[in-house]
Image (tube, grey):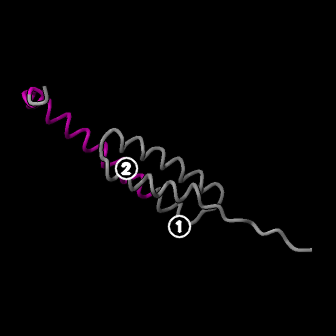
Amino acid sequence: MKKEEKTKENSFGIASVILGILSIIFLSFQGLVLGIIGLVFAFRQNSFSSNKWSRAGRILSIIGIVLSILVIILVVIGLKSNPELLNNFR
């Protein structure tokens, strides 16, 4: 009899890497949401099998989340200190 081989499924890990990269690119509320979803996918992949994809996805998603939060804070501070900037968008 042949032993059943475990198939290494990397789909959640690859998805977490892609979402982590997108969260770094967008850097706003969309980036924050993509980073959180990527982080969930990385932990899900880690529960199946811990590999480089899950680690890379976790790192990229955390970087995207942190950068998105910083950009949101800077935009809020900028708009608070200079509310006339909103008039340019109307």
Q: Is residue 85 above or below residue 42?
A: above
Q: In which quarter of the image is residue 7?
A: bottom right
Q: What element carries label 2?
A: helix
Q: Which amino acid does label 2 sit on?
A: Ser
Extent of the magenta region: 59-87
Please rate how many residues cluster around mark 2, counting C-alpha atoms within 10 Å: few if below 14, some from 14 to 19, many from 20. Answer: many
For image coordinates 85% across by 72% down, the residue present is 3
Say if the magenta span includes residue 89. Answer: no
Could you say which is closer to the camera, residue 52 or residue 1?
A: 1
Say if the magenta span includes residue 64. Answer: yes
- Residue 14: x and y in percent read 52, 59
- Residue 8: x and y in percent read 67, 65
For image coordinates 60% across by 61% down, the residue present is 10
Q: Is residue 36 above or below residue 88?
A: below
Q: Quadrant of residue 78?
A: top left
Question: CA–CA distance between discs 1 and 2?
Answer: 19 Å
- Mark 2 sits on what residue? 23
Q: In which quarter of the image is residue 71?
A: top left
Taking the image as shown, residue 66 lies to the left or right of residue 52, namely left
Quarter of the picture containing the N terminus is bottom right
Task: First in sequence, mark 1 or 2: give its number.
Answer: 2
Quarter of the picture containing the C terminus is top left
For image coordinates 55% across by 58% down, the residue present is 13
Residue 65, which numbered label? none
Q: What residue type is labelled 1?
A: Lys
- Mark 1 sits on what residue? 52
Q: Is mark 1 on a helix, strand or loop?
A: helix
Please rate how many residues cluster around mark 1, counting C-alpha atoms within 10 Å: few if below 14, some from 14 to 19, many from 20. Answer: few
Q: What secondary structure prevails in the magenta region?
A: helix
- Residue 51: x and y in percent read 57, 65
For image coordinates 39% across by 56% down, the residue present is 21
In front: label 1 or label 2: 2
